[in-house]
Image: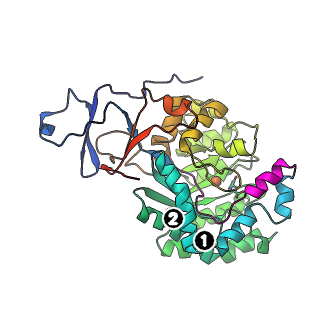
Amino acid sequence: MIPDSGSYGLIEGGALAIKDGMISYCGTADSLPSDFADWTVTDLGGGLVTPALIDCHTHVVFGGDRAREFEMRLEGASYEEIARAGGGINSTVQATRKASEEDLLKSALLRVDTLIGEGVSTLEIKSGYGLEIESELKILRVARRIAADRDITVRTSFLGAHAIPASYKGEAGKYLDEVCLPALEAAHAEGLVDAVDGFCEGIAFSPDEIAKVFDKAKALGLSVKLHAEQLSNLGGAALAASYKALSADHLEHLDEAGVMAMAKAGTVAVLLPGAFYTLRETQMPPIEFMRKHGVAIALATDCNPGTSPLTSLLLTLNMAATLFRLTPHEALAGATRNAAKALGLADRGMLAEGLRADLNVWAVNHPAELVYRIGFNPLSQRYFGGIPCTQ
Ligand code: DI6
Ligand code: FE
């Protein structure tokens, strides 16, 4: 079943009223109530107005880059050979540990500004390239500073269970006890954590190990989410659903039982076509089962130096349509209202009275253009909390 492309809820000749950063009217200009008659009017020139975009899964704060690794892969080296030669995720961990907070902020802002330039106003940022207590805290402090420096909302996820650092090779349990869980406690005490994430995979942490991290998250009153079923099916999404996770992400190897568990828990499926593309995966996420069981689908860049060096959410939408066959309507919902749901944010993601006035004005004739065009940025104005932005 392919859902029809829908009307996108389009309103021709629309008007929005904004007060105190919130939408107080959304409808046609003709039926605007007379109470708004003497309000200051801004003419948006006939542009298309949408909710601001939300990138609900990123790792934008990291040191160094992995361009040489990309070259090596094209020269024939495998991901594993590169990792054994000191590359891969551990090379990013080394570079991130060495970088100062200022350096990390500076390099992350270049990526964040590119996302903002396409109308992203809410951004999730994960830790997970520190893998030692102080370095995990450093990444999350940078994430908070990004929110202070730019007109955007940042939601942080603690991802101490991202990889087993070289110094704990073969000792995942010890790493969790000595580093990951104490780092989570320390980060939470400093107000740096909005949610807790993990990487459940053969090359990372088992479902039992992830459960340990989630138990700690729940004890601290934090929501959870999970990188699950990216390279194999370990039942991670069902585990996440059993903790009422906000989202399970990647999901290429998810089966129908996992989809049903997510549907029952209201867990959002976050699809990451940038990683699928970069790794040249062939196993598609089970979109038909998600549609059939009513699992909300969100989309995100997964911006990270290894598997998704992607800083365009618009290109992500195009990839989701071309690679995963999502409709443009589903793709746009995936970067707005379903992305808001994936972050547990009920105050944004749609144009509706009572929600935040985070808006984008686009120079396009039809919403599908935002998904269909490649390498084209038609953003003409961004509003954050009702205020026009210069960034
Ligand atoms: N899944 C991924 O694909 C990335 N992290 C994750 O949990 C890999 C990150 C990297 O290679 O640096
Ligand atoms: Fe990721």
Give the CA distance from mark 2 to mark 1: 11 Å
63 part of magenta stretch: yes
* Residue stretch in magenta: 56-76
Mark 2 lies within 8 Å of ligand 2 (Cβ measured): no
Question: Can you identify the residue that label 2 sits on?
Answer: 143
Question: Can you identify the residue that label 1 sits on?
Answer: 136
Label 2 amino acid? Ala
Q: Nearer the viewer, residue 211 or 379?
A: 379
> Eyeballing the image, is 143 above or below 47?
below
Q: Residue at x 74, y 59 (%)?
A: 206
Name the chief secondary structure element in magenta.
loop
> Eyeballing the image, is 28 above or below 192?
above
Q: Earlier in the sequence, mark 2 or mark 1?
A: 1
SS category of the residue bearing label 2:
helix
Image coordinates for residue 315, horizontal then vertical, percent: 58, 39
Badge count: 2
Which tag is nearer the camera, tag 2 or tag 1?
2
Q: Residue at x 70, y 65 (%)?
A: 92
5 part of magenta stretch: no
User: Could you classify mark 2 by the number of other residues whose Cα lies within 10 Å: few (under 14), some (14-19), or many (20 or more)?
Assistant: many
Q: 389 left or right of 65?
A: left
Q: Nearer the viewer, residue 380 or 307?
A: 380
> Eyeballing the image, is 62 above or below 270?
below
Image coordinates for residue 181, horizontal then vertical, percent: 62, 72
